[in-house]
Amino acid sequence: MRPIGTYLREARLRKKYSLSHLEGMTRIKREFLDAIERENWEVLPTFSVVSGFAKSIAQALELDEKQVTAFLRRDYPPKDIRINPRPDVADKFFWTPKLTFFAGVLLFLVAILGYLTFQYLNFISPPRIELTAPKEGQVITRQFFTVEGKVSRGSTVKVNNQLATVGDDGSFSSQIEISSTQREVTVSAVSRSGKVTTIHRTIKPELK
């Protein structure tokens, strides 16, 4: 039983048709015609397309279309059907222990960098002063008055050029003597980088 390729080639040669002539008759590329005769199925399109080619060739060579189709079904090898995954499945993100490790390292580095940045900015920035006493325009009725407040940690505080006691949390206090002519209290804070912040508070001495 002759293979379909041999069957079609012999029929073409009996008609004394070249592949180029058959190409003109069927409008099928010469390369496809040659591949069918050689049964080189790998370079040909799908079975349904090749089946259409076979019918056109059968008409051109005056062959039985049903017989040619039967030969093709017999000789055409089944092709492996490759199921391509859907793009969304192929690109789906999966969290792995390795990613957990790298994420943890990244978060740790970000935290360290943030902390160092915060410390650096805190170091180069002028200290903050929160003066709770005296209030602006406060009436002072006692000769000795305690100036209180809070500054950035690590700062040195002076009240009217008198060194104040500063706690670990930045709170400070200093007892100063108020004169009847004094109209202002000056608080200065100096950071470790040498930055200075000064606050002037107006007072109203009414000593008894």
Image (spheres, rainbow, N blue to C red):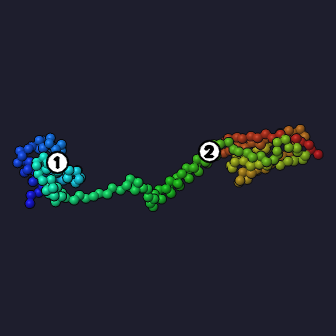
User: What residue type is disc 1 on?
Assistant: Ser
Going by the image, does 191 lie left or right of 41?
right
Q: Residues within 10 Å of mark 1 (few under 14, many from 20)?
A: some
Using the image as rendered, state which of residue 60 and residue 140 is in the foreground: 60
Looking at the rendered structure, which numbered label has been put on residue 170?
A: none
**Residue 83, picture quadrant:** bottom left
Classify mark 2: helix, strand or loop: helix
Q: Residue at position x 77%, y 46% from top?
A: 131
Distance between the alpha carbons at the discs numbered 2 and 1: 83 Å
Give x and y (percent) for residue 59: 14, 48
Going by the image, does 159 lie left or right of 52?
right
Which residue is under mark 1? 56
Give x and y (percent) for residue 89: 40, 56
Going by the image, does 206 lie left or right of 112?
right
Q: Quadrant of the C terminus?
A: top right
Which residue is under mark 2? 121
Q: Residue at position x 35%, y 56% from top?
A: 85
Q: Residue at position x 77%, y 43% from top?
A: 187
Going by the image, does 134 lie left or right of 36?
right
| Residue 179 in sight | no
Give x and y (percent) for residue 38: 13, 52
Q: Quadrant of the N terminus?
A: bottom left
Mark nearest the camera among 2 and 1 is 1
User: What residue type is disc 2 on?
Assistant: Leu
Decide which of tag 2 and tag 1 comes sooner along the chain: 1
Q: Residue at position x 77%, y 48% from top?
A: 149
| Residue 25 in sight | yes
